[in-house]
Amino acid sequence: MLQQIAWPVSLALMILLAIGFMFVALKSGRRADDYTPMQVRAYRIRTKLFWGLVLVLGPTMVYNLADLPYSASYARPAESGAQAMVIDVKGHQWRWELSRNRVAVGQPVEFRVTSADINHGFAIYDPDMHLVAQTQAMPGYTNKLNYTFRKKGTYKILCLEYCGIAHHNMMTEIDVGGL
């Protein structure tokens, strides 16, 4: 649930911050009489540089945030009303234990993720090795991650949080196709 509201909250806070900056900039008085010509020139350059950065980095930030796995339909429950397949996941040092490792394309899946020992980062990568969904695997707590696989292939599950000497070997696969 929190993942689904992260993008709108982030965007609202960015807009509020921008409004605050503009308010302060518009309300600040100019004391040009106290400045030397070199200081005036430096402040003009600084002002142009600031607005140049805002114009370049602002859209870049919005573009990058829009592509986060939890900002689109990635982590949402299925809109089709189809019953979600439940896959229980338990992280161990240094392996994943899944209740099943085959799903159908378009089948909503609810991953119930926990850990038997320490914190692990549960991450699902598509066949092109792009991160599509993630959550934490924590001992004594179960996180739910909803995901609908949109294309066939072999998806990898990797650990995103260093969990010990064999962390790099902590991976498994989910086969997505027709059941």
Image (tube, helix red, strand yellow):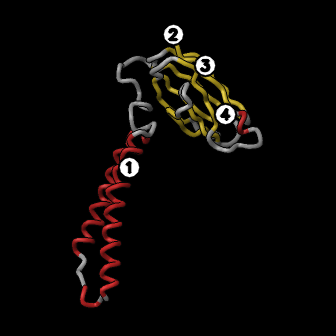
Quarter location, residue 25: bottom left
Query: Can residue 140 be seen here?
Result: no
Real-space CA distance between mark 2 and mark 1, rounded to the nearest whole angstrom: 38 Å
Please provide percent x and percent y for residue 140. 63, 39
- Checking the image for residue 91, the label placed there is 4
Q: Are the residues tagged 2 and 1 within 8 Å (C-beta)? A: no
154 lies above or below 4: above
Please provide percent x and percent y for residue 78. 39, 24
Real-space CA distance between mark 3 and mark 4, rounded to the nearest whole angstrom: 14 Å
Report the mark closest to the observer, 3 or 1: 1
- Secondary structure state at the residue bearing disc 2: loop
Query: Can residue 72 be seen here?
Result: yes
**Mark positioned earlier in the residue sequence (4 or 2):** 4
168 or 58, nearer to the observer = 58
Real-space CA distance between mark 4 and mark 2, rounded to the nearest whole angstrom: 27 Å
Report the mark closest to the observer, 1 or 4: 1
**Mark positioned earlier in the residue sequence (3 or 1):** 1
Q: Are the residues tagged 4 and 2 within 8 Å (C-beta)? A: no
- Checking the image for residue 178, the label placed there is 2
Q: Amino acid at mark 1?
A: Thr
Please provide percent x and percent y for residue 88. 59, 25
- Checking the image for residue 60, the label placed there is 1
**Mark positioned earlier in the residue sequence (2 or 1):** 1
Q: Amino acid at mark 2?
A: Gly
120 lies above or below 175: below
66 lies above or below 34: above
